[in-house]
Amino acid sequence: MDHLKFRRQFLLTTEPVSNLGTWNRLNLGAHVLYTHPDLTLFHTQEATAEAVLLGHILDPRDEARKEIDILNDIVKNPKVKDIVKVLYGLSGRFVLMVKVKDRLLFFNDACGLRSFFYTEYQGQLQLASQPLLLKLVVGDVVAKSERYHSFYESDYGKNSKENWFPSGTSLYDEVHHLVPNHYLDNNTMAQVRYWPTEQHQIQERS
């Protein structure tokens, strides 16, 4: 049953992890990306940039265009504004990681259906598909917050079979969640809104 634990999930860390022996590993700068064998991964690299996609992207305008084609377009022009242009209009459920020199950028699909959580440990970003995977790296640094207790002690937490809480929130101290339509920059640890890309003026009806 061990192969079902954390199925289709991932962990990106600068710290050694010994108990994910069957998982795939990929070096991404100073980080190592651990992925469950059942999680689909695409990877491409150019001279100045590297990109990893976890999950799937669909282009409704061109069904022949595959994930690796999209990644190749991204690494050719890895500036944020160009990455956003590539992602605009695409569908799917994914996490995108783009490495340019010592900078790591993280995006997910427009609705945040494949989400991730992150924290900082010894000055380095640690990132995973859920907080309990982060505990493999940082241990008790990932601690249940007051929000955790108030959530699970509420009527909703006790009676709901499918728990839901707002995007951008976490039930653990010092653990953050990426908001949809934002990207995360590991150099600043800031979430930056990237969509809409233009200011839209509302025209009043005459």
Image (cartoon, rainbow, N blue to C red):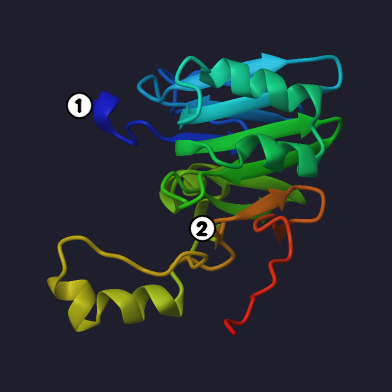
Q: Residue at x 47, y 34 (%)?
A: 10
**Mark 1 or 2 closer to N-term?**
1
Side of 102 where 135 appears, left or right: left
Q: Secondary structure at mark 2?
A: helix
Q: What amino acid is labelled 2 in the image? A: Asp
Q: Front-most of 99 and 74? A: 74
Q: Is residue 195 above or below residue 58?
A: below
Q: What label does residue 183 carry, if any? A: none
Quarter the N terminus occupies? top left
Tell which of 88 and 147 is nearer to you.
Answer: 88
The reply to whether residue 50 is visible in this rendering is no
> What is the CA distance from the residue labelled 1 to the residue labelled 2?
26 Å
Rendered location of residue 103, percent (x, y): 81, 39
Residue type at the position of mark 1: Met
Disc 2 marks which residue? 140
Instruction: Give the side of residue 172 with respect to residue 52, left or right.
Output: left
Work out which residue is located at the far front of the displayed protein and give it.
206
Q: Which residue is mark 1?
A: 1
Figure check: 46 above or below 30: above
Q: Could you say which quadrant of the image residue 38 lies in?
A: top left
